[in-house]
Amino acid sequence: MKIYLNIVVLCLMLFSSKEIVAQKDSIAQQRKARKMVRQGNKLYQQKQFTDASVAYQKALGNNSNYDKASYNLGNALYQNKNFKEAVPQYELTAKTAEDKYTKAEAYHNLGNAMMETKNYQGAVEAFKNSLRNNPNDDETRYNLAVAKKLLDKQNKENKDDKNKDNKDNKDKKDKENKDKDDKNKDKDKKDGDDEKDKKDKDDKDKDGEGDKDKDKKQDPKKDDQKDQKQKPKPQQGKMSPQQIKQLLESLNNEEKKTQKKMNAKKAKGKKVKQEKDW
């Protein structure tokens, strides 16, 4: 039993010593965190915002729930125009701060950072939360009115842009449909012209073949008659009375010569029968 009690006492002593060491470490870290915050504040006053941000980050490394360190880090980032990086620091402070004044300040600065990033909806909510913790802050109330006005303007512009996009899309679609219709019309017209040309060609070929068949079917006799009509006829000559007289005299002379020859032959020998050639 005595041994058991000694073991219990020993365990309590060990536990107590570890807790004391942890407390000492925690106190030492808090002191270091406070020291880094003071250093950061000094740099902040000298407008060395980048170095101040490093000091505040070191302070949070020693004590992650140190509200002043996160709040001041947000301010240093804000002054360096790192608005997006400042937002989560203000949100952390607003969440962990225990007094309403610190919460109000964190929400106020959070609203300002969101205004810079044109997140007007978020800024409106931040300023409202700030006024819930400190209703008498006229500066926050003024910022809330400005944020609401900018939010209404942004919503109107977004609506106009949306309507413009819809109109542009509609115009584009209408133009595409019109171009498509025009293309179809041109195609139909071309097809119609081609069909007409083909039909005219067929009719022309048909007429040509008909003329050939017609020519083939014509009566050959008619062709002969046509040729005869077209062939020039010889004209019969007309003799004058003097020419007739000369012709008769010539015939008489020829007949006399012939008669004379016959008489001469008859005298010499036997008569020979001879056919006339005229």
Image: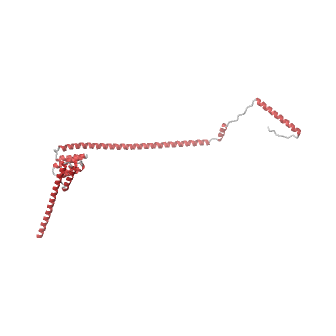
Left-right relation of 228 to 83:
right
Q: Nearer the viewer, residue 80 or 8?
A: 80
Q: Which quadrant does the C terminus fall into?
A: top right
Residue furthest top in the image: 241
Left-right relation of 153 to 5:
right
* Residue 204 visible in the displayed image: yes
Residue at 16% across, 54% down: 35
Against 62, residue 116 (above or below) is: above
Residue furthest left in the image: 2
Picture coordinates of residue 245, whole percent (x, y): 78, 30
Q: How many marks?
A: 0
Left-right relation of 226 to 111:
right
Say how the picture is coloured.
Answer: secondary structure
Q: Which quadrant does the N terminus fall into?
A: bottom left
* Residue 125 visible in the displayed image: no
Residue at 48% across, 42% down: 193
Q: Nearer the viewer, residue 46 or 209?
A: 46
Picture coordinates of residue 48, whole percent (x, y): 21, 49
Against 199, residue 97 (above or below) is: below
Q: Nearer the viewer, residue 224 or 28?
A: 28
- Quadrant in the picture for residue 214: top right
Picture coordinates of residue 243, whole percent (x, y): 76, 31
Against 247, residue 28 (above or below) is: below
Residue at 61% across, 41% down: 215
Picture coordinates of residue 171, whole percent (x, y): 36, 42
